[in-house]
Structure formats: C-alpha cells, structure tokens
Amino acid sequence: MGTQPSLPSHIDLMWPTIEAIKQLGGSGTNEEIFDKIIETEKFPQEIQEVIHRNNVTKLQYRSAWARSFLKMADIITNSSRGIWSFTKEGEKISQEEILSRIKEKRQNYHQNRKSTSSLEDKEEELPKENPLEWQEELLETLKLIKPDSFERLCQRILRESGFSSVKVTGRSGDGGIDGVGILRVNLLSFQVLFQCKRYRGSVGASEVRDFRGAMMGRCDKGLLITTGSFTTEARKEATRDGAFAVDLIDGEELCELLKKLQLGVATLMIEKVVVESDWFRNI
C-alpha cells in the first residue's frame, strides 16, 4: 500500500505563496494565488478536497493563514480591492529568512508575554484574528436557510449588481437551472442563466459540464454560485478553450459580495482612543 500524502501546514504554504505571487507578475487575488499554488505544488485531488469546516477546504484555510502570517511580517500586503503584492522587504526575502522574520515580528507584538509554544510545532499559535472567521459564520448561516430562500438571496444579489428581469425558476428536471436574468452593458444586453449550489465541499468539473450542457442554446452567459469552493479542475473546465464559458462565484466571493452590497453583513467602525503620554510630558 502506498503512503497517504500529507496535508501541508500553513508554514509549508508560505514560500509557495511567495512563489505564486512572483509567477503572477508580482500581484494576485486570493483565487489566483491559490490556483497557482495548486498548479505548481501539484497537490493530488484527495488533498484538495479535504474539508476543514463550513465549506472551506483545509488547503484554502491554511493558505489564508499563510497569507496572514506573511502580511504580519510585512512580506506581502493587500489593497482595499483584495489584491496581494510584495512589500519592499518581501521582494527580496529568501525562503530561509521567512520564519525568523515572522518570529521577530511576533516578539515585537508580544514583548511582555512569555510563550513556550513553537511556531513550527503548533498551528494554533496564530495571530488573534482569524482571516476567515466572519466568512465562516456567514457561510454557516447560509447553510441554515431554506433552499428557496437561498435562491431568492442569489436573485437579490444579481438585482443589486445591476441585473434586470431576474426570475427564479427552480424547476425540477431543468438541468439544475435555478433562474435567469438580463445584464445590460452599455448598448448590449446578455441573458444569463444561473445555478445556486449550497455545498459543504468543492464543486468539481463534472458539475460545471452538467450546467453548461443545460444552458447551451438558451442564453448568452452562465453563472454558477456556490457556498462551497471550486476545484482547480472545475475552474479550468469553466474557461476551457472551445467550450461555452461559465462564470463562477465561490463561497469566499459570495461573502465579499454580500459584504460589499451590505446584504445581511454590516461593517462596524470601532473607535479606539489612545492617550499619548509623551505629548503631556513634553508640553
């Protein structure tokens, strides 16, 4: 019997994250970076499909932590649009320097705390803020609503995003088509069929092919929305040369859309008052 491939830790994914950003030209989205890591590291399908919780795979979860650590160490940074790029220090950092730089930053943050745990040994020794915490809560909430409520939510998202004449069909035996809408871009209008999938795991290439088959000859574009994730093969299938293109929205993008549109997600600005003691001493 062959040995079962092991899941990489968030530490294992730090250098592949840096390499992925380099290969993408110095910047990239979460999705682009993750897909590039899968491509270069050649993780087998059984590794890609291991679920952490709440529709997020362990690879996605640990990849998010890798980005979080690299950001904490001022190696990479992300813009307001969620695009990751290198800092000046990150452009020239070597693989051997990463952990020492992270440890140095952590010591600066916790000068008055004593820690006996090792970064290499414990994945729990992480920054306080979980980069996926609010998304996990939101996705868990979406799983608890009724299927027709989720379809109406997708309908609302499309309307808020500029679609018109959005209708939920949800007819059985319709190849999984859940609704249709019209998107007008300047002088052109496109009929878009959409499918909503509340998944705990990853949507594979076969589901994309089935959706494409159901929409052929009936619309100009197809949109597949899921609370889960898409495998790398599914993303490749969605944009395969010679095939009808299908646009994909995974759980992470769905959360960001709801946040942007302020649909059931509120962003709170917390005021923090800081007393500058030095100012009073020097007055």
Image: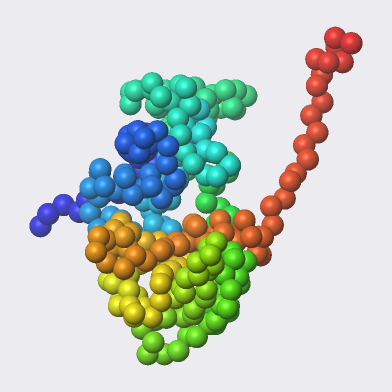
Residue 6, image x, y percentages:
26, 49
Q: Is residue 218 left or right of residue 133?
A: left
Q: Residue furthest left?
A: 1
Residue positioned 46% across, 34% down in the render: 85
Identified at 58% across, 74% down, the residue is 164
Numbered disc total: 0
Image location (x, y in percent) of residue 143: 52, 72
- Quadrant containing the C terminus in the rendered view: top right
Q: Is residue 56 above or below residue 278?
A: below
**Residue 250, can we see it?**
yes
Q: Nearer the viewer, residue 44 or 119?
A: 44
Quadrant of res 157: bottom right
Q: How is the image coloured?
A: rainbow
Furthest residue in direction right, as rendered = 283
Residue at 37% of width from left, 66% of height from top?
A: 246
Indicate the position of residue 108 as horizontal and vertical percent values. 57, 23
Q: Position of residue 132 (x, y in %)?
A: 52, 51
Instruction: Give the residue furthest to the top.
Output: 282
Answer above or below: position of 44 versus 226.
Answer: above
Residue in view at x 77 percent, y 37 percent: 272
Residue 123 appears left or right of 41: right
| Closer to the camera in the image, 246 or 125 | 246
Image-quadrant location for residue 234: bottom left
- Residue 127 lies, with reference to residue 142, above or below; the image says above
Quarter that holds the N terminus: bottom left
Considering depth in this image, is 261 or 159 the residue closer to the camera? 159
Name of the residue lying farthest toward the bottom: 172
Residue 144 seen in the current view: no
